[in-house]
Image (spheres, coloured by chain):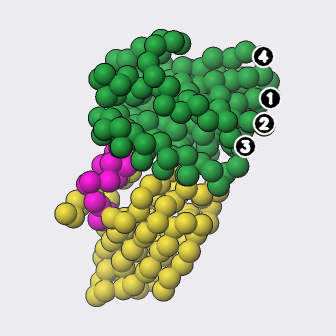
Amino acid sequence: MSGHVLFDLALLPRWEVISEVRRLVSRALERLEIEPDHAYCASLATHELLENAVKYGKGEVRVRIVLDPKERTVKRVDVENWTTRAQVQRLKRAVGDVATAQNAMRKYTSLMGRSNGGLGLARVAAEGEMSLLCRVRANRVAVSAVPTGGSADV
Amino acid sequence: MSEQLGQLSIDSSTVGEKLVLAMSGSADMRDSSGLAELLLKHDAEARRLGLKQVDVDVRTVEFMNSSALNAFVRWFADMKRRGQAYRVRFLSDPSKRWQRGSLSALASFAADTVTVEAVV
């Protein structure tokens, strides 16, 4: 794995911590003078992926932010959690659905107003201009958001 | 009138033929049904009073999660279904990055009714 890990946080799945983690990430990236668009996209991805993990996961959630300090950019945001087999399948479908969309913004607006989920993921892809990847090992699932044009390099 | 939904404050007032919803704080609720209900309540009031415009001032809103954005979409979808009675204008702070991305996506959902105005 290349890049510098800025954060590798282990969290209890509590709704109250989501915004605090987003603010922490945002402030830290600002102080490190990370390119502002990258900083915003990373904090957006942190928030939306963490919401999914807290909503649908079980037990500890891990959040990892990987930087390219030379370029002052974010290489990727990883959020990892345990969940049920059914949720793993649901998440894989939702990530695949967003990842294969021809037009991320059109996909995002098409999901608006529906209640069948995936909106947060679509928002990360459209507004955050990030690609999504899903890795599964048993019932442990990791979703990575990588700035478009970047490499997951896991 | 002031209302509070989690970390989001909403002050509503009527100015002439316009309803102003001034929001501040952070809209990051787990369940956005409270926000959706509140928006529909103001929609009903705007219709009852025959108002021509609703201004949603989000300049001091730090962040909205996708669930909160969806509450607005439900409002606009309901407005489309029942026929447009007024226009909606978001007053935004372009220095807040989420507002540049999210509000344009919201406006594209109801382009004939919703506009976004950057206020510096």
Q: Which of pointers 3 and 2 lies earlier in the amino acid sequence?
A: 3
| Res. A128 visible in picture | yes
| Image: B7 above or below A18 | below
Task: Tell me if residue A58 comes above or below residue B117 in the rendering.
Answer: above
Q: Earlier in the sequence, mark 3 or mark 1?
A: 3
Chain on which label 4 sits: A
Asked whether disc 3 touches disc 2, contact meaning CB atoms under 8 Å apart, the reply is: no
- The residue drawn where x is 47% and y is 42% is A25
How far, Cα to Cα, is label 3 from label 4? 20 Å
Seen as rendered, the residue at the extreme left is B120
Residue B18 relative to residue B36: left or right: left
Q: Which residue is mark 4?
A: A138
- The residues colored magenta run B89-102
Q: Nearer the viewer, residue A85 or A150?
A: A150
Q: Which chain is yellow?
A: B
Q: Say if residue A113 shows up in the picture.
A: no
On residue A12, which mark appears? 3
Tag 2: amino acid: Lys
Q: Are marks 1 and 2 in contact (CB under 8 Å)?
A: yes
Circle 3 marks a residue in which chain? A
Are the two marked residues, 4 and 1, in contact with CB atoms closer than 8 angstroms? no
Residue type, numbered disc 1: Thr
Per the image, the residue denoted by label 2 is A58
- Give the distance between the C-alpha atoms of the residues marked 2 and 4, in whole angstroms: 13 Å
Indicate which disc residue A84 carries: 1
Q: Amino acid at mark 4?
A: Ala
* Chain (green): A
Which marked residue is nearer to the observer: mark 4 or mark 1?
Answer: 4
- The reply to whether label 2 and label 4 mark residues of one chain is yes
Q: Position of residue A101 (x, y in %)?
A: 45, 23
Separation of disc 3 and disc 1 at Cα? Answer: 17 Å
